Amino acid sequence: MTKTMMTHGGRIVGIKSKRKEEPEDQTEELQCSICVDLLIQPTNLDACAHVFCNACISIWNMQSKQCPLCRAVFLSLSTVRVHRRLHRMLADEVENLTPAEKEVYDLRVASAPSRLKDATDERELVRGARAAQLYAERTAAAQRQRQVLRQLSELIAGVREASTVSMEAMVALSAATATAAAAAAAVQRQRQVHGQLLVSMEVIVALNAAAATASATAAAAAAARVARVVEMEASEALVALNAASATAAAATVARGARVVEMEAASAALTVATAEVAAASALVGQISI
């Protein structure tokens, strides 16, 4: 068996003993997980059935409602539901303690109620100090609340005054917004009109260009027609001139023919005259 002295504040508070022949789980089963010593007045929890010293778990209960081992939330403590086998094992373990260990264990058993009472008194003191602190905090909070209420009242009055000014500003802002919207609409319409004017100008320029092209084309066509007319007239004049030349030539030929005929007639007349003269002479001779 090995022994370990446990001290607190310079005084012995327990002896942790472990016999080599005892199983490991049996020794741990007889130990409190809070003070890590033999159990005193074993007490278990209703949520998980873990067992602790009554004073240890009672002091723990003042601070938390969770099991120190598994963190299960418990509602009550019980010394009745502890199994009898655990009591027998604990009694056997206490009987096997040495006189020094037994004395320390008895001191722990005797000091358990005082430990619990000291913890309770300390808790009450803490509660009283906490209550005084809470009262001071509540008083200070009430004063701060009253101060905040006064500041809030002043703020509400300022907000009301500011809201009046804000309403006037909002009205002015609404009017300015409406004016700006109207100006924006006018600018938009002006832009649309300007765009339409630009389009119209482009259309007019295109129409003028088309009209100029058409005029040039018409002028060219008119010039071509005039040229064709002049050419036709020249052709007709040439034909007429040719016809006149032909007619003049024919007239010249006719005049030549008539001259020949006249010359032939004159020659015939001359011959006839000669014949007449010859006949006259012949007649004169015959008359003689």
Image: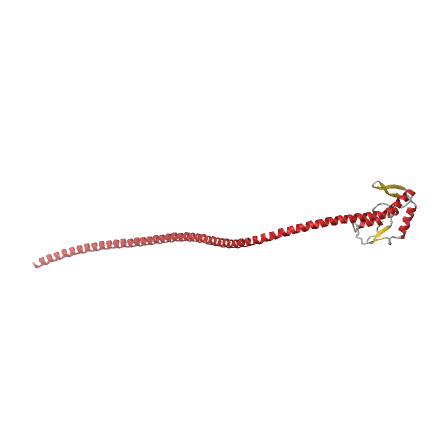
> Residue 263 falls in which quadrant of the image?
bottom left
For image coordinates 82% across by 50% down, the residue present is 58
- 8, above or below 207, in the image: above
Which residue shows up at 72% across the image and 50% down it? 135
Question: For this view, does 255 lie left or right of residue 53?
Answer: left
Q: Is residue 228 left or right of residue 112?
A: left
Question: Which quadrant is the C terminus positioned in?
Answer: bottom left
Farthest-out residue, top: 10
x, y percentage for residue 234?
31, 53
- Residue 279 on image: x %, y %: 12, 58
**Near-viewer residue (156 or 217):** 156
Colour style of the rendered protein structure: secondary structure
Position of residue 238 measured from the top left corner of the image (x, y, whole percent)? 30, 53
Query: In front: 172, or 187?
Result: 172
At a point 22% along the width and 54% down the height, the residue shown is 255
Q: Is residue 273 visible?
A: yes
**Residue 68 visible, this orientation:** no
Residue found at x 67% / y 50%: 143
Residue 101 vs residue 186, the one in the foreground: 101
**Residue 286: where, in percent of width, then height?**
9, 59
